[in-house]
Amino acid sequence: MLSYALRRLLGAIPTLFILLTLAFVMMRAAPGGPFDADRELPPQVRANLEAKYPLDEPLYQQYGRYIWDIAHFDFGPSFQYRDTSVNDLIASGFPVSLKLGAASLAFALIFGIPLGMLAALRQNRPADYGAMAIAMLGISIPNFVLAPLMILVLAVYNDWLPAGGLGGWQNYVMPVLALGTAMMAYVARLARGSTIEVMRSNYIRTARAKGLSAARVVWVHALPAALTPIVSFLGPAAAGIITGSVVIETIFGIPGLGQFFVQGALNRDYTLVMGVVLFYGILIVAFNLAVDLLYGWLDPRVSY
Amino acid sequence: MIFGRRKKMQQAAHGRSLFSDALRRLRSNKAALASIGVLGFIVVAVVVGPWLSPHNYFAQDYGAIWVAPTTTDAHWFGTDGLGRDLFVRALEGGRISLMIGFVATLVSLVIGVAYGATAGYAGGRVDGVMMRIVDILYAMPFLFFVILLMVFFGRNILLIFVAIGAINWLDMARIVRGQTLALKQQPFIEAARMSGAPAVSIIARHIVPNLLGVVAVYITLTIPQVILFESFLSFLGLGVAEPATSWGALIKDGADEMNRAPWLLIVPAVFLAATLFCFNFIGDGLRDALDPKDR
């Protein structure tokens, strides 16, 4: 187990290295620089600025410096926000994004798993069709459609929830619903499929034959096995939530990482944008590793 | 009489192929059939519809600004703040959205099938290296790179095709490889190899045709993903550029003005959601038809 984790961590290094290189190449290949203001800067000012954010060194030196800094978790200074490092920006935005993402994931699991299991236990009956129709709707309505529609109905026509910004828990209701609904739908479909399969297996028949109650068979015997595909879905789910948060944070005006990313990209704040992309990349790699370890723990048949 | 009996025997001897079996199951799936109908209607509307309206998608009519859906002057879905007719714009946007869906899926299909079939057929170390590359690419937050590409190099439809296609082939390559590994053990592949057929022609003539079922399912599930992705980009203001439009771009415009003109949001949202809904139902139906394990 430990050696597997170590091997996976080592395996993640080339991935991250390619990510870094790609980020660096794109930053340098992009036309237009961070100091292309509306007004041409005086050459002396420009040279000073470039010397400050070492842009005047040869490329390989810049690349080396970049890798070195990142290896020390230093994402460099932001080009746009003067006197602020990208680390500070990430530190201020990530907790907000994390709260939003975790709440959405929790929402998806808490509602998706029971919905899917219910559908499986009532397979091909009205409850099943109803649950799967809801799931299909959830998958087919994109979050950037759901979010404005919710704002229209819940905030504009009825003054039930705030339309954006950050404050109390009310501010999180719509973003979490918008971000979590599609995820919930996927979870419900996965839970249905795996529950149907598990309920047909021999050990469930044995449990039934022993005379266990239906509830015990479902919750104690079937549930852990039915959960395994959902655990392996958590990796892609986290990536999906991170992507979705970009648009959701923009719509609801939430000052998280996603909004920084969009603003940074539009302002050509290279270091901020690349910092956020790298941070996300590292996060996804770490999350996938955690999910794989959890998977092995849940399903003893998996060996490393 | 004799003739009739003979015909019956022929039928019995003919047997049922996987394909005809699948078709029969698909036909009994009402949701999938209805989805095919609705989707066909949307496609025809998108192709033919703009010609039915007296307006075009970029003309501005300052005499008809913020008109709610009405039959007067043929503004069936209303107009936006520049007096552009939403009926034509929604269909025109659909043309772009669907076209991106089909073309980008085709790109990912070609790359993914070629890569996956080659890796699966070659096996061994080649397979290991090729799949390791896929694994590494898989962990990249590509979407962010696409967003950056759009920001840095301008919004251009060709770039969208290439970028989306280049991301989506990873899944396809994995699925195709898995299938190829299983197919490779089949006697007819052995026979082809025995008779001295070169690897390229075995892949092209024997492996790829047998992947069609899986690939068909995957295509119907990829097209909506691609449409969704393009809409996502357009919603962020990074997809197709004005005056061209897509459903995502229209939804963005609508979301900005929903207090004043909710129809601008609702019309493209319904089109987009209905299309995605249909594709997903058809994909599900195809999967169940080809692999009826869970039904």
Image (cartoon, coloured by chain):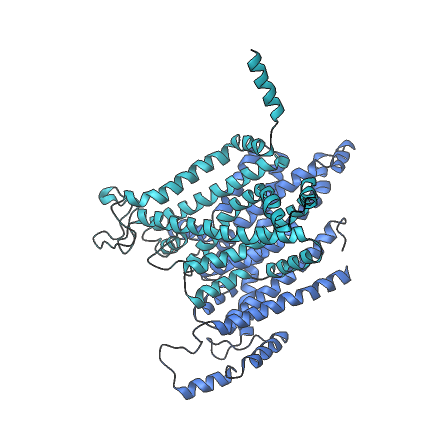
Chain colours: A blue, B cyan
**A50 horizontally vs B198: left or right:** left
Q: Nearer the viewer, residue A242 or A10?
A: A10
Q: Residue furthest right?
A: A210
**A2 horizontally vs B118: left or right:** right
Q: Residue at x 64, y 54 (%)?
A: B119
Residue A134 visible at all? no
Up the image or down, A167 lies above or below B292; here it is below
Quadrant holding the N terminus of chain A? bottom right
Q: Residue furthest bottom?
A: A44
* Image coordinates for residue B136, horizontal then vertical, percent: 63, 61
* Image coordinates for residue A48, horizontal then vertical, percent: 46, 87
Up the image or down, A259 lies above or below A234; here it is below
Say which quarter of the image contains residue B7.
top right
Residue B32 visible at all? yes
* Image coordinates for residue A237, horizontal then vertical, percent: 58, 54
Q: Residue furthest left?
A: B63
**B174 horizontally vs A179: left or right:** right
Q: Nearer the viewer, residue B20 or A44?
A: B20
Say which quarter of the image contains residue A132.
top right
Up the image or down, A47 lies above or below A115; here it is below
* Image coordinates for residue A15, horizontal then vertical, percent: 63, 65
Q: Residue at x 62, y 55 (%)?
A: A235
Q: Residue furthest top?
A: B1
Quadrant holding the C terminus of chain A? bottom right
